[in-house]
Amino acid sequence: MIWYFVVGVASLLVGVGGTVALTPKAAPVEPVVVVPNEKVQEQLSNLDIVMPVCTTEFIQQNGDGLCREMFCWAQSNSTTGGAGEKSCDAVSNVNNTLVILKTCGTLEAQPRLECFQTFRERK
């Protein structure tokens, strides 16, 4: 009976030892070092997409709503995080309301009420 115990323990030791010996060793993982790249930050905060709608000519012809909204969204996505999402949503809401008033205001009485009702339901 003792021999069964000795053979069992020996088998266990040989099995564990073989597993440890034959298991490949993982290469040490080197830590990832992130170096701040000033050029990338400059590109992310570049307002080149806002420039065409913020020119004096565009604002005189179309108003400043699109310029304000795009500038707000650009600032909320920049590295400085100057504007919050709620602020930009408020600017968008004002712009949308002005477009609705302008669009529905050109219609006659009955279609105008239907127009306002349609926008109110969707807004």
Image (cartoon, rainbow, N blue to C red):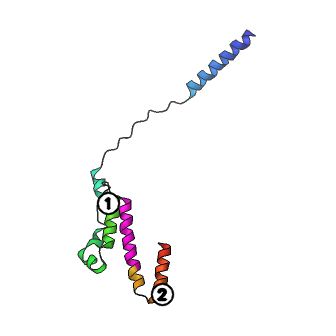
Residue marked by disc 1: 75
* Up-down relation of residue 94 to residue 82 (above or below): below
- Which is nearer the N-term, disc 1 or disc 2? 1
Residue 34 image offset from top left, x and y in percent: 34, 44
Q: Find residue 65 and name its label.
A: none
| Residue beneath disc 2 | 111
Whether 79 is among the magenta residues is: no
Give the magenta-colored segment's residue range. Answer: 82-100
Q: Is residue 30 left or right of residue 63?
A: right
Residue lying furthest bottom = 108
Task: Classify the position of the N terminus by image quarter.
Answer: top right
- What residue lies at 38% left-to-right and 61% top-to-bottom? 86
Q: Quadrant of residue 95?
A: bottom left
Q: Residues within 10 Å of mark 1 (few under 14, many from 20)?
A: many
Q: Nearer the viewer, residue 12 or 123?
A: 123
The quarter of the picture where residue 80 lies is: bottom left
Amino acid beneath label 2: Pro
> Residue 98, position in %: x, y?
37, 77
Q: Is residue 98 above or below residue 107?
A: above
Quadrant in which residue 60 is drawn: bottom left
Q: Determine the main secondary structure of the stretch shown in magenta.
A: helix
